[in-house]
């Protein structure tokens, strides 16, 4: 008795068209996801720099407050100084009266590495008044 091998009518695998359609759909889904991840990463870096700038500005302001207790006549003006690597600080010290001074501290990340804190690079600005204590 001769037995004929019968071919299975069920396909085993995908056709080229099915593979191309699946790859195209995967690409259409992945592009927005990758763009979203890139945007989230850029925003995360910006928030991290702003928080670091705030911490450095608060520390600089506390340092000035502490030094002004015994040395009220010191001039705290500083157009640009490095605080922590690529972070720069700008101090403005103006007289608001005989026994009152206005201190403005601006801290930001020096994005273009030119050593000067420019308008677009300022991320945090704090202002306080210091009074003569005695």
Image (cartoon, rainbow, N blue to C red):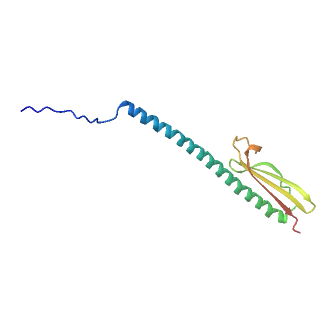
Image side of residue 98 versus residue 18, left or right? right
Query: Which quadrant is home to the C terminus?
Result: bottom right
> Can residue 107 be seen by looking at this rendering?
yes
Q: Looking at the picture, tell me which residue is in the foreground, 21 or 63.
A: 21
Taking the image as shown, residue 19 lies to the left or right of residue 35, namely left
In the rendered image, which quarter contains the N terminus? top left
Q: Vertically, is 17 above or below 52?
A: above
Q: Position of residue 75 (x, y in %)?
A: 86, 55
- Residue at horizontal 83%, vertical 62%? 68
Q: Residue at x 87, y 64 (%)?
A: 131
Residue 129 at x, y percent in the picture = 84, 61
Choose top left, top right, bottom left or bottom right for residue 99: bottom right
Extreme-right residue of the structure: 98
Residue 87 % position (x, y): 70, 49
Q: Is residue 116 visible?
A: no
Task: Give the number of marks.
Answer: 0
Q: Is residue 112 above or below residue 123?
A: above
């Amino acid at each position: 008795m001769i037995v004929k091998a019968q071919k299975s009518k069920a396909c085993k695998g995908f056709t080229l068209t099915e593979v191309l359609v699946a790859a195209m759909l995967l690409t259409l889904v992945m592009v927005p996801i990758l763009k979203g991840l890139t945007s989230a990463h850029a925003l995360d870096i910006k928030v991290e720099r702003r928080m670091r700038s705030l911490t450095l500005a608060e520390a600089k302001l506390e340092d000035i407050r502490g030094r002004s207790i015994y040395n009220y006549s010191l001039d705290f003006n500083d157009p640009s100084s490095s605080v922590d690597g690529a972070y720069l600080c700008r101090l403005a010290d103006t007289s608001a009266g005989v026994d009152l001074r206005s201190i403005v501290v601006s801290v930001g990340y020096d994005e273009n590495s030119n050593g000067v804190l420019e308008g677009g690079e300022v991320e945090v600005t704090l202002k306080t008044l210091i009074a003569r204590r005695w």
